[in-house]
Image (spheres, helix red, strand yellow):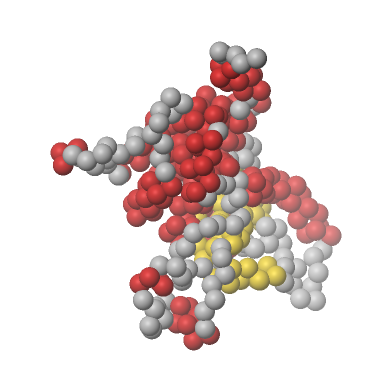
Amino acid sequence: MPSLFAAEEREAKLSKLGAPLQSLDQHVDFAALAGAVDQALPRPHRYFGGRPPYPTELMVRLLVIQQRFNLSDEQLEYQVLDRTSFQRFLGIRDSGKVPDRNTVWSFREKLVQAGLGQAIFDEVNRQLQAQGYLARCGQIVDATLVQVPIQRNRRDENEQIKRGDTPAGWPDKKLAHKDVDARWTEKHGKPYFGYKLSASTDRRYKPIHKLHVSPAHENDQNHLLKVLDEHNTSRDLYADRGYTELDRLREEGSRQHIQRRAKPHRPLSETQARRNRRIARIRAHGEHPFAGLRQLGGKVLRCIGLRRAALQLQLKAATYNLKHLGWLKEAGVKTF
């Protein structure tokens, strides 16, 4: 028999079960995230009229949903129209106006042009620190490869791209569909095409505190200083064999726990092997955020160009940190 209160009963049951977005809504200040965007990218003035843009907070929440569930723009539009939990999270349960796929793409492109992915990521980390999850127990530096669609070019075109030139005869329309920033690299004997995400993770609470995105072929060591978290009050730094100790950091008082690499015909001593295993037990915590990014779809991107890839990964890392913040709060993890 139809119930007059069916919608309320379903929402009450969703709240009791603990919807995935409910924790984010409870513990995250999305108004502050929207404020970080509006500060650098002011909303258009209404002097010239026209339809007013959607609220920035609504668009930021849309991007969080997109990254949280790894949705394309088309699927995001459909799911928002279809799913009650998404509508409740966005605050449009009783509204007939829902941003479409073109609106989401346009907003994201504005973030790309303004380089605001880092501002959103920094605001998320500020909220983590404001709630007591400070970085005080050392940091783990690591890198992972992120794949993008393989480009099919001629050999001479690839040579020009490697030199930083645009292949002759490419019209603007073709260039817009070609990724000239991604590069090939090899890991464990397997080729990869895409970008490299280097990150610094807090040893205790495991959020990502700093990150850097580059073409995949760049050496991990080149990004070590770029991802060091200067706000981590501990001097301990953990890293794998892809990095080497830096005299500059040692002079600044850093304790560098970097695994030793065996040289040809010179295997590691038993003492060095024990040291590597001791570091590996701690360094394994730095793999947890990368596993979290993989669950969010952060190991394969659907975009073209370094700037778009950087924004996608910054948003993905910010969403991981927000999700992790909700877990820390729900699990009752103690703060300093």
Total labels: the figure holds: 0
- Name the residue at 66% across, 71% down: 191
Query: Can residue 22 be seen here?
Result: yes
Quarter of image, res 289: top right
Q: Quadrant of residue 5?
A: top right
Specify whether residue 234 is in view.
no
Q: Residue at x 60, y 20 (%)?
A: 10
Out of 24 and 142, give the one closest to the viewer: 24
Q: Position of residue 160 (x, y in %)?
A: 45, 82
Q: Position of residue 178 (x, y in %)?
A: 46, 70
Residue lying at the far front of the rendered structure: 1
| x and y percentages locating residue 232 in the rendered image | 53, 41
Give above or below for 144 relative to 62.
below
In the current view of this chain or complex, which residue is farthest to the bottom? 156
* 101 sits to left or right of 283: left
Nearer-the-camera pick, 261 or 208: 208
**Image quadrant where one finds the N terminus:** top right
Residue under the point 51% across and 42% down: 78
Q: Residue reaching furthest right? A: 270
Q: Is residue 40 above or below residue 247?
A: above
Depth order, front residue of 28/56: 56
Quadrant for the C terminus in the image:
top right
Residue found 72% across the figure and 72% down from its top = 189
In the image, farthest residue toward the left: 47
Residue 142 found in image quarter: bottom right
